[in-house]
């Protein structure tokens, strides 16, 4: 092929890949077409990589081959992690993506300096800053999710001032570099400072804020890739980055709305602090508790049961037992559905994946807006490992730190059952009024074991 | 303003709108696979890394390029793999027994 023909081939291949990427996300919108979406993405990726290998400016394939093989060796185990590890895997993959972008940006700078046009230097700085802070930020998030690092938010006085100063310093140096792109010795600053900022940004973030933070990091990773597209003048990269960036952005908006908090509040608010005082005024109050036998009797005589899962279900790995409960009740003609809060778990959609893994049909998994109007016709709301997302204080108590947060209206069901280890408050450290209602029965114990006991009682009851 | 740059700005703006409209329609059911799929697609940055590692312009760019390929490729392979594994699990109810 002549160089011209090769270039046209490459450009057309990139165009096809771009179309396939958009279709991929479009098909992902419904479970029935979603797997077709993955195929489209894979084909687009293959076409784009193959076309790139045709480029005439590639002189040597050895290093490319080494990189591709190495990436595959790392990627396969990352693709095969158990479903419970998906949140930390996702954080890790944000880190890998950001790492790639920051490295390419760095290499491009040293190849081009001192003659870098201002606009290019501007997007290149953005690419490197966002890439670096997303890299360490995502590693921190993954560490917290894997519980290698403490999950509790760590706060100190002047934290926000320190963080904002770091960010401002990085931006100031970037501006200087745009004006003087030959100032090579300053370039490491816009790598190092954002790396530190990424760590500091995640230090005050607690587990319950992870869904928002992971989405936000997703958005940053996309933006940095789009910036890289500008530096390399690649439309394909710009489109992919913009798609990823807008996806992360939309998810962050949904997550922060579901917690009734703004981005700034999530990043700079340090939820942990407010709670300490709220948890201080606790008194011993009466709750009603029940055994597995009693719970089984109530559940089997119900017409409609809604199960509300939370992070506690994931921790206890109770999803397969929940599936057995679902089967046992469905067999008795009880209508069982699941009510899923947008921020239940540690990342967007976390509960849906766990329940789908346990073979629960997806049409039984209803989101908050779909299930809330139904609760008044529900006989039993069974809460497994969820807390703050069911706290009626969010509706009633203006002094509560979670006031205004949309919740699942489980208190409107005829009977509420809560499986919980003990009376300790949830992640937000706030006492849950729900537990003291007359219609509420507390089922104390490990989620997996308790659900198993109920299933056994239901099976025993069938014989008698 | 060079026309190339202007075209790129149009592209990023339009892609942002397309992304917004397409992703807004994704059911909350599939938000986790959405994130892993966009992650895999984002790893298209691998094409930039491939050029960098193949051009052999400097030792630094070759080394960084190779590392970047590995990082992005792990997202390509891992991202598509786990997305498909997740989506395989989403099944509808079997038709009601009459």
Image (cartoon, coloured by chain):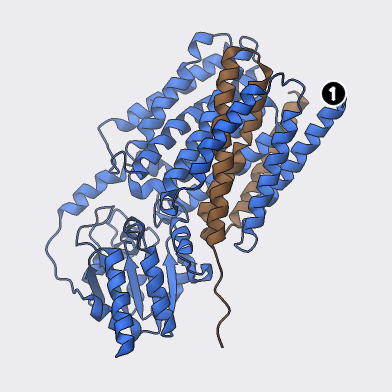
Chain colours: A blue, B brown
Q: Nearer the viewer, residue A282 or A421?
A: A421
* Chain letter of disc 1 in the image: A
Q: Nearer the viewer, residue A148 or A376?
A: A148
Residue A253 point in image, percent of width and height: 49, 49
Element assignment for label 1: helix
Q: State the residue lying farthest toward the bottom.
A: A464
**Residue B66 against residue A409 in the figure, above or below:** above
Count of marks, rendered view: 1
Left or right: residue B25 versus residue A313 is right
Tell me the residue that label 1 is attached to: A3
Residue B94 point in image, percent of width and height: 56, 76
Residue visible at 28% across and 62% down in the picture: A397
Residue A193 point in image, percent of width and height: 42, 22
Residue A55 point in image, percent of width and height: 76, 26
**Residue B27 against residue A25 in the figure, above or below:** below
Give the position of the N terminus of chain B as an image quadrant.
Answer: top right
Q: Is residue A105 visible?
A: no
Residue visible at 49% across and 12% down in the picture: A186
Q: Nearer the viewer, residue A410 or A108?
A: A108
Give the position of the C terminus of chain B as an image quadrant.
Answer: bottom right
Residue visible at 62% across and 14% down in the picture: A111
């Amino acid at each position: 092929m002549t160089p011209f023909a090769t270039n046209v081939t490459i450009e057309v291949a990139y165009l096809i890949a771009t179309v396939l990427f958009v279709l991929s996300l479009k098909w992902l919108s419904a479970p029935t077409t979603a797997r077709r979406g993955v195929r489209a993405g894979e084909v687009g990726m293959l076409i784009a990589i193959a076309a790139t290998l045709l480029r005439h400016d590639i002189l040597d394939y050895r290093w490319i081959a080494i990189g591709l093989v190495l990436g595959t060796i790392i990627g396969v185990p990352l693709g095969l992690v158990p479903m419970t590890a998906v949140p930390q895997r996702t954080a890790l993959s944000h880190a890998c993506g950001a790492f790639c972008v920051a490295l390419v940006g760095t290499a491009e700078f040293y190849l081009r300096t001192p003659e870098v046009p201002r606009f290019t230097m501007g997007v290149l700085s953005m690419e490197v800053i966002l890439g670096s802070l997303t890299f360490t930020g995502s590693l921190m998030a993954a560490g917290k999710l894997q519980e290698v690092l403490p999950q509790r938010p760590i706060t100190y006085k002047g934290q926000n001032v320190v963080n904002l100063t770091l960010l401002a310093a990085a931006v100031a140096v970037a501006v200087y570099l745009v004006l003087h792109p030959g100032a090579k010795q300053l370039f490491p600053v816009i790598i190092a400072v954002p790396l530190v900022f990424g760590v500091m940004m995640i230090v005050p973030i607690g587990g319950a804020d992870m869904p928002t933070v992971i989405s936000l990091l997703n958005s940053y990773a996309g933006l940095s890739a789009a910036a890289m597209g500008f530096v390399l003048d690649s439309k394909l990269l710009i489109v992919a980055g913009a798609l990823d960036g807008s996806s992360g952005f939309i998810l962050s908006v949904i997550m922060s709305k579901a917690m009734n908090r703004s981005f700034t509040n999530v990043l700079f608010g340090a939820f942990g602090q407010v709670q300490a005082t709220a948890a201080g005024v606790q008194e011993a109050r009466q709750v009603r508790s029940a055994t597995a036998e009693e719970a089984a009797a109530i559940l089997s005589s119900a017409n409609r049961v809604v199960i509300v899962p939370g992070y506690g279900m994931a921790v206890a790995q109770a999803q397969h037992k929940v599936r057995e409960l679902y089967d046992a009740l469905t067999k008795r003609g009880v209508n069982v559905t699941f009510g899923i809060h947008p921020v239940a778990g540690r990342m967007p959609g976390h509960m849906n994946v766990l329940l789908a893994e346990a073979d629960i049909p997806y049409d039984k998994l209803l989101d908050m807006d779909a299930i809330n109007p139904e609760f008044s016709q529900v006989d039993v709301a069974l809460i497994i490992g969820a807390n703050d997302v069911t706290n009626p204080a969010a509706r009633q108590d203006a002094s509560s730190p979670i006031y205004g947060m949309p919740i699942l209206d489980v208190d409107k069901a005829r009977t509420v059952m809560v499986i919980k280890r003990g009376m300790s408050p949830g992640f937000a450290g706030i006492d849950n009024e729900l537990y003291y209602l007359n219609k509420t029965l507390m089922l104390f114990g490990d989620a997996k074991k308790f659900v198993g006991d109920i299933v056994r009682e239901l099976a025993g009851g069938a014989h008698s | 303003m060079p026309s190339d740059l202007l075209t790129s700005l149009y592209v990023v703006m339009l892609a942002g709108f397309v992304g917004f409209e397409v992703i807004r329609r994704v059911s909350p059911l599939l938000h986790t696979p959405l994130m892993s799929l966009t992650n895999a697609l984002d790893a298209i940055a691998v094409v930039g890394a491939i050029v960098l590692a193949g051009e052999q312009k400097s030792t630094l760019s070759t080394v960084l390029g190779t590392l970047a390929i590995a990082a992005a490729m792990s997202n390509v392979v891992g991202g598509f793999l786990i997305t498909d594994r997740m989506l395989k699990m989403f099944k509808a109810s079997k038709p009601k027994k009459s």
